[in-house]
């Protein structure tokens, strides 16, 4: 059955048609400080707990901080690979719940772009891992910067994180606008963080639907909301992931539901039978821009 895009309500009639792959998932957001890194980390750990083989890439090359959040002191970072100080395999480290981490170091924003990583063979290195890993989760820098846009293009799914502040909603709409307008990306999953209630989360989502109504045929899927919880910053202070600091908290229960949703997105079927983490077609299109 082929999918019909219903422009009136911005939904595909066949839900299978919008869920092509869950292999590489980009966590992005228009505004800073909305909880992207916290969510990337804990969704990765939740998938790890579910016994999936997960890798988490810290793609916030301006302010890489996933390793700080869990008190890891990486011997090598992706920066060292780019600078020729070590091999790609040297930067893969084992973390909690079987999740493998690729850390980055801050302050190298200009050095890294996905085309740069592609030229250095790193994209193929990631793709070479595709048989050993079920999910690659990529945490990105906030806002409209080239490396985050590149990651959005290169991944199969994009989870946009926002909160209930008008600026966050407007900035998320701006990000969707550019990802659709410039790169023809049409499928976005949305997670409202630090919401006050289910109603609050739904209102934020509805507001986002309103302000994106004129962008074009984009599909925006609501993944739900996460409540504000002081435990998140207490865990960060202890340098322990919330998954281990407060595994029974509402935030973690909801993030586990999100991970379950992610795991239900049908796997990508490549004609070659090989699942590639990064969608190289998208990358090569960008490199030729
Ligand atoms: N649900 C929540 N409840 C309470 N505090 C939260 C929640 N989610 C995130 N925070 C806090 O919000 C702050 C920002 O979180 P985080 O660093 O994950 O955001 P970010 O979007 O990755 O930021 P940046 O844009 O700087 O990368 C942190 O202090 C974190 O502890
Ligand atoms: Mg962050």
Image: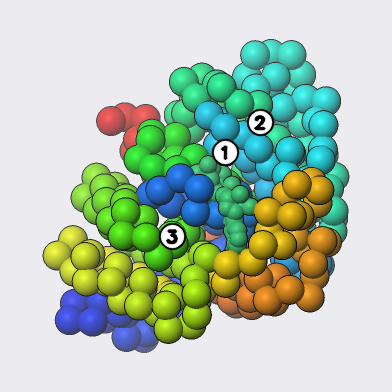
Position of residue 275 measured from the top left corner of the image (x, y, whole percent): 60, 56
User: Which label number is shown at residue 187?
Assistant: none
Q: Are marks 2 and 1 in contact (CB under 8 Å)?
A: yes
Determine the secondary structure under disc 1.
strand
Pointer 3 residue Cβ closer than 8 Å to ligand 1: no
> How much space separates mark 3 and mark 1, taking CA atoms?
18 Å
- In-image side of 34 versus 257 (left or right): left
Determine the secondary structure under disc 2.
loop
Q: Is residue 55 visible?
A: no
| Residue visible at 32% across and 85% down in the picture | 13
Count of all numbered marks drawn on residues in the image = 3
Q: Is residue 60 visible?
A: yes
User: Which label number is shown at residue 59?
Assistant: 1
Position of residue 30 measured from the top left corner of the image (x, y, whole percent): 38, 49
Q: Quick one: which residue is furthest to the left in this view?
A: 214
Position of residue 176 measured from the top left corner of the image (x, y, whole percent): 30, 55
User: Which label number is shown at residue 162?
Assistant: 3
Disc nearest the viewer among 2 and 3: 3
Residue that badge 2 annotates = 104
| Residue 97 position (above or below residue 111) | below
Q: Quadrant of residue 264?
A: bottom right
Position of residue 170 measured from the top left corner of the image (x, y, whole percent): 28, 56
- In-image side of 173 versus 50 (left or right): left
| Residue visible at 49% across and 71% down in the picture | 195
């Amino acid at each position: 059955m082929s999918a019909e895009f219903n422009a009136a309500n911005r939904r595909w009639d066949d839900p299978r048609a919008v869920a092509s792959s869950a292999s590489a998932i980009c966590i992005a957001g228009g505004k800073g400080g909305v909880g992207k890194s916290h969510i990337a980390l804990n969704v990765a750990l939740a998938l790890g707990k579910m016994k999936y083989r997960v890798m988490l890439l810290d793609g916030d090359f301006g302010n890489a901080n996933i390793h700080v959040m869990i008190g890891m002191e990486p011997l090598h970072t992706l920066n060292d690979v780019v600078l020729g100080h070590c091999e790609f395999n040297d930067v893969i480290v084992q973390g909690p719940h079987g999740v493998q981490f690729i850390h980055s170091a801050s302050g190298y924003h200009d050095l890294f772009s996905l085309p740069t990583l592609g030229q250095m063979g790193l994209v193929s290195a990631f793709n070479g891992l595709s048989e050993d890993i079920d999910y690659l989760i990529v945490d990105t820098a906030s806002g409209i910067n080239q490396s985050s846009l590149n990651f959005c293009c290169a991944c199969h799914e994009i989870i946009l994180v926002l909160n209930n502040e008008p600026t966050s909603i407007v900035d998320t709409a701006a990000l969707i606008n550019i990802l659709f307008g410039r790169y023809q990306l049409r499928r976005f999953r949305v997670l409202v963080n630090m919401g006050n209630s289910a109603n609050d989360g739904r209102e934020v989502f509805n507001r986002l639907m309103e302000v994106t109504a004129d962008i074009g045929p984009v599909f925006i899927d609501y993944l739900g909301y996460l409540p504000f919880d002081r435990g998140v910053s207490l865990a960060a202070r202890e340098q322990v992931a919330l998954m281990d600091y407060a595994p029974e908290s509402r935030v973690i229960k909801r993030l586990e539901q999100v991970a379950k949703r992610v795991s239900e997105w049908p796997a990508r079927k490549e004609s070659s039978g090989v699942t590639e983490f990064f969608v190289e077609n998208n990358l090569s299109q960008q490199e030729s821009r």
